[in-house]
């Protein structure tokens, strides 16, 4: 960890097992990620701030072993 790393980044969940809440949605996203192949349709994560969209995207990126491109 670098000195400038934020608390959020330092303690961000790194697997689906570490993400808490909305288990039904997480199960659907996990299933999609495990079955995804190049060329398949992506997913759009929508919700209010602080609900775990970015963290979920990081975990999916790791599961798919693909780089994460974030656009704000």
Image (tube, rainbow, N blue to C red):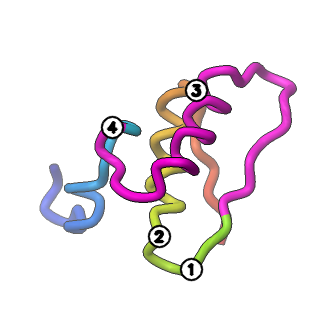
Which residue is tagged 1?
A: 48
Q: Which mark is residue 51?
A: 2
Earlier-in-chain disc, 4 versus 3: 4
On screen, residue 12 versus residue 62, left or right, reads left
Q: Is 25 rendered above or below residue 8? A: above
Which marked residue is nearer to the observer: mark 4 or mark 3?
4
Which residue is tagged 3?
A: 64
Q: Residues within 10 Å of mark 2 (few under 14, many from 20)?
A: few
Q: Position of residue 2 (x, y in %)?
A: 17, 54
* Quadrant of the image occupied by residue 21: bottom left
> Which secondary structure, mark 1?
loop
Q: Label 4, label 2: how many angstroms apart (C-alpha)?
A: 16 Å
Contact, mark 4 vs mark 3 (Cβ under 8 Å): no
Contact, mark 1 vs mark 2 (Cβ under 8 Å): yes
Q: Position of residue 46 (x, y in %)?
A: 67, 67
Q: Label 2, label 3: how many angstroms apart (C-alpha)?
A: 22 Å
**Who's the residue at 60% across and 23% down the image?**
34
Which residues, given as a range, are shown in magenta? 17-45
Which residue is tagged 4?
A: 17
Q: Label 1, label 2: how many angstroms apart (C-alpha)?
A: 6 Å
Q: Label 4, label 3: how many angstroms apart (C-alpha)?
A: 16 Å
Q: Is residue 63 magenta?
A: no
């Amino acid at each position: 960890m670098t000195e400038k790393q934020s608390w959020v980044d330092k303690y961000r969940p790194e697997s689906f097992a570490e993400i808490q809440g909305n288990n039904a949605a997480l199960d659907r996203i996990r299933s999609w990620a495990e079955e995804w192949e190049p060329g398949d349709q992506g997913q759009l994560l929508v919700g209010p701030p602080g609900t775990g969209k970015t963290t979920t995207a990081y975990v999916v990126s790791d599961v798919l072993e693909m780089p994460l491109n974030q656009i704000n």
